[in-house]
Structures are given as structure tokens and as C-alpha cells.
Amino acid sequence: YYDDVRGFGLDYYRGWLGHILAHGDLTVRKRVVDIGCGTGRYTVHIHGALGRPVVGLDLSAGMLGKAREKVDGGSDIRLVRGDAHHLPFRDEAFDAAVLILVVHHIEDLGALSKELHRVLAPGGRVLFMTRSHEEIEASYIAMFPGVLEIDLARFPPIDRLESVLERAGFVGVAHEREANLGFTMTREQVMDRVDGRFISTLSLMSDAEFEAGREVFAQRLEERYGDGPVPTAT
């Protein structure tokens, strides 16, 4: 279900993968962990690009079950169930950690940051892929009533995330904004994804709130984009 309503084609993941590999400096780092790996969409692509063992961690047994379906029997991808606030790994176990669209699910950024600092070896790197408040406000899904307010509350501001990481001991903390790589959808594709509640924000709404919001969103989407393409970043 998650891959069906959230997934894009292979070119989409390859496009973001290049940025992840570069900013995470992953090609020269031997031990990589994908925290909040979900169904393994990025884990398998990172592994394929590096050709080295990769660990994926997620709290959801259901998500990990889907991830295991993507992993060949002889693969050296290791999938682990665990809580990002209490990482089940020894000190200095990894050279790099990636967290792709995960941080808004984290209740305690301070605890997460301390755990990341603990499990990374000296000189290790952590890469977050998240959404800035500016990107949230500009996204087409912000036209859905209630989404903007929910997501602005869930996603930490970039400067807050940076300061929390610095307090945990990380140095050289920086961010860079990336465009949506030119990926677009038709209005019909957007509505199909919305009907599947493709982002967790929509699942936080009651059925009544969702149905009322859907009607308004469909009208706004048509008014803004007509029959033209709808740009998407996630």
C-alpha cells in the first residue's frame, strides 16, 4: 500500500539518489545506516549504488516486511527493527547515517541527535532529507485544507534542526536546498495519490475532515494548474 500510493518511477529515486550520495559523501564511507528506512525504497538504491553492506532501521514491522520483499536472499542489506531515539547499535558502528523524510516523525530531536553522534565514528556524517517550511508552504498539497497547519507543526524549522545537531556535538552543520528535479504529475495522478492518503498528514485527519478538504483541494488544484503538469518534490 505505502509503495503504491507514495512510489514514483525508478528515475525519480535515481534522481534524488545522486544528491543523497553526494551530500552524504557516501561513496567513500564503508558503513552506512538508513534510519527510518520504511519499505526500503532508498535503502536498496543506496546499496545498489555503493555495492557495500547497508543497514536499514525502522520501527514498523509492517514496513520492514515490505522492505524484506525487495531484498534478495543473498543480499548484504541488513534490516533491523528499532527506535531512532534508542538506536540498537554499538558506539561508532557507522561512518554515515541517512534519514530521508523521517525527522517529522521524531518526538525528541535531542535524543535522536545524541544517538546519531554516538553510533557514528569520528569523522562520520549524517544526512537529513526533509522539508523546509518554505517548501511546505509552496507545495501543491498545501492547498488541501488543514495540511499546511499540520505540517508546519510537524516538520522542525531547518535552523532548529541545525542547532540541535550542534548541541549534540556535530560540527560543520549546514543545509542546502534542492529543487524537485523536474518531476511532475497530472492532476488525475495527484488526486489518485490524495485519495490513497499518500502522506501521513492526510491520515491524521478524520474521514469527515478529509472528505470536506478533498472537495476544496480538487477545485483549487484545477484552478491553479488546469490540465497542465503539477510539480512535485516528494
Image (tube, rainbow, N blue to C red):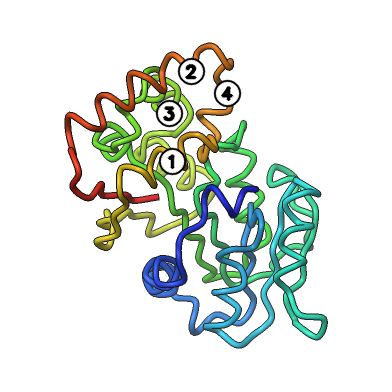
Q: CA distance from mark 2 to mark 3?
A: 19 Å
Q: CA distance from mark 3 to mark 1?
A: 15 Å
Q: CA distance from mark 1 to mark 4?
A: 23 Å
| Amino acid at the residue labelled 3 | Asp
Disc 3 target residue = 151
Label 4: few (<14), some or many (≥20) within 10 Å? few
Disc 1 target residue = 161
- N-terminal label among 2 and 3: 3
Residue drawn 24% across the image and 36% down it = 138
Q: CA distance from mark 4 to mark 2?
A: 13 Å
SS of the residue under disc 1: helix
Q: CA distance from mark 4 to mark 3?
A: 11 Å
| Amino acid at the residue labelled 4 | Leu
- N-terminal label among 3 and 1: 3
Tag nearer the camera, 2 or 3: 2
Q: Nearer the viewer, residue 230 or 23?
A: 230
Label 3: few (<14), some or many (≥20) within 10 Å? some
